[in-house]
Image (cartoon, grey):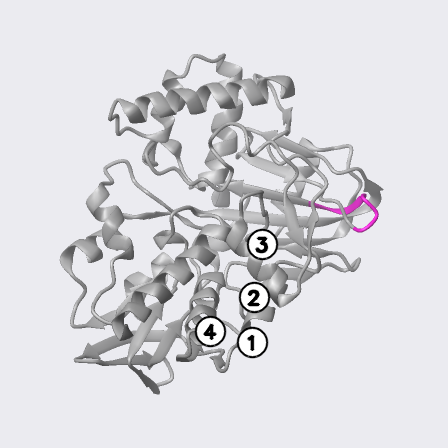
Amino acid sequence: MKVIVVGAGLAGLSAARSLEKAGHSVVVLEARERVGGRVWSTTMANGVVVERGGEFVFGGYDTLGAIAREVGVELVPRGFNYGDRRPVGHGLGTREALVPTAAKMAEHRAQRAAAGMTGSFADVFETTDIAPEDRALLTARFTIACGWRLDEVSERWPNPQPSIDGHSEFVVPLWIRGGNQLLAERIARELSEVRLRSPAVAVEQEGEAVVVHIADGTNVHGDAAALALPLPLLREIRFAPALPAEKAEAYARMGMGDITKLHVTLAQRVQPDAIQTTDIPLWAYTPAEHDGLSSVVASAAGGPAHRQALDIDHGNPAAFRERLHAAWPELDLGADALLTPWGLDPWARGAYSFHPVDWSDALETALTTPFGRIAFAGEHASEEQTLDGVMRSGIRAAGDLLALSA
């Protein structure tokens, strides 16, 4: 069987790897000039590698960990506790209250789920019996985590990038030495054919044949396809025949969170640490390098208002840099600043998806259900929107296609 995989992020690459290991012919089509998708590593002027997109690896990422070992990349600690962030600003809870308040929120959320409640993530926060200042701190944190207003995010499917069980996020996360994109590059190196600068615009299927149309007017013919595109791009693919109504509705109703990251070099090396502010809101962290210190500060702002507040659309990092300096004045910021606005990225158009309040089990099932000889992968079609969940979605999509030839 010849399979066309559309998208060379971790989901598409994982699907392609599984299919080739099962003995099938695979061609991967990628719109960008690189592999990795929303996993994107860049070297700053001082020689430090930073993550412009997906960054953190946690315990329990067994799929990612196994593949990382197989392709020969090394996971190393980032040096700071992911959930333990120093609150910055007026009216915020204390650092010491983070663990118990997060745990209390998680317990309350579980109780609401058991009772069949289907409100918003904001409803969970508003009805959890914690101090207002602790609620403000958690709200700011999860607004960034979801990349959107919490009153529009379903409490049943909140983005679990920072683990929402109230406990496991309070650990030191891991990272691939040399950059997370190295994992994508190593996987791609194993594959027979990866075509860059090849954005798909349409997918046709008839009988046991699938044709993917590329923007340059060329076509790729195969026996099946796996689509691992970001949600906004998947919505624009022309399908013939058209997608089933429920599947099309699921894609149309999902939301897309918006996050911008800023990296700035430091004139003085510092210990790893992290802060959280309700201003915008944003958080920032100084990840450890080879000697345990940091010479770059990374920061992220999220939600529907952050781009205007930080003048993101003009591509100038100055406003974001000023807010970062105001929040963390102890840092001696250097000259090199790198702005990464995911909402403006033409091949992503957002950070990751979220489920709206009126989401349903039927819509959730529709996300991953194959359509004829087409399977679907990616963070929007994964069990959890983590780097590990994305890779598992690719392996699951490969399994859907392998069933066709069984």
Q: Amino acid at mark 2?
A: Ala
- Residue bearing mark 1: 190
**Whole-Å distance between the Cαs marked 3 and 2?**
13 Å
Depth check, mark 4 against mark 2: the one in front is 4
Ranked by sequence position, the earlier of labels 4 and 2 is 4
**Whole-Å distance between the Cαs marked 4 and 2?**
16 Å
Ranked by sequence position, the earlier of labels 1 and 3 is 3
Tell me what residue is drawn at x 52 percent, y 32 percent: 141
Q: Is residue 325 above or below residue 264?
A: above
Q: Is residue 406 above or below residue 83?
A: below
Q: Dividing the image into 4 quarters, which one contains the N terminus? A: bottom left
Q: Amino acid at mark 4?
A: Lys
**Whole-Å distance between the Cαs marked 4 and 3?**
18 Å
Q: Are circles 3 and 2 on residues that touch, CB within 8 Å?
A: no
- Residue bearing mark 3: 65
Q: Position of residue 15 (x, y in %)?
A: 42, 67
User: In the image, is 27 to the left or to the right of 316?
Assistant: left
Q: Amino acid at mark 3?
A: Gly
Ranked by sequence position, the earlier of labels 4 and 1 is 4
Q: Position of residue 324 (x, y in %)?
A: 66, 38
Q: Identify the mark at residue 21; answer none if there is no mark.
A: 4
- Residue bearing mark 2: 184
The range drawn in magenta is 290-297
Ranked by sequence position, the earlier of labels 1 and 2 is 2
**Whole-Å distance between the Cαs marked 1 and 3?**
17 Å
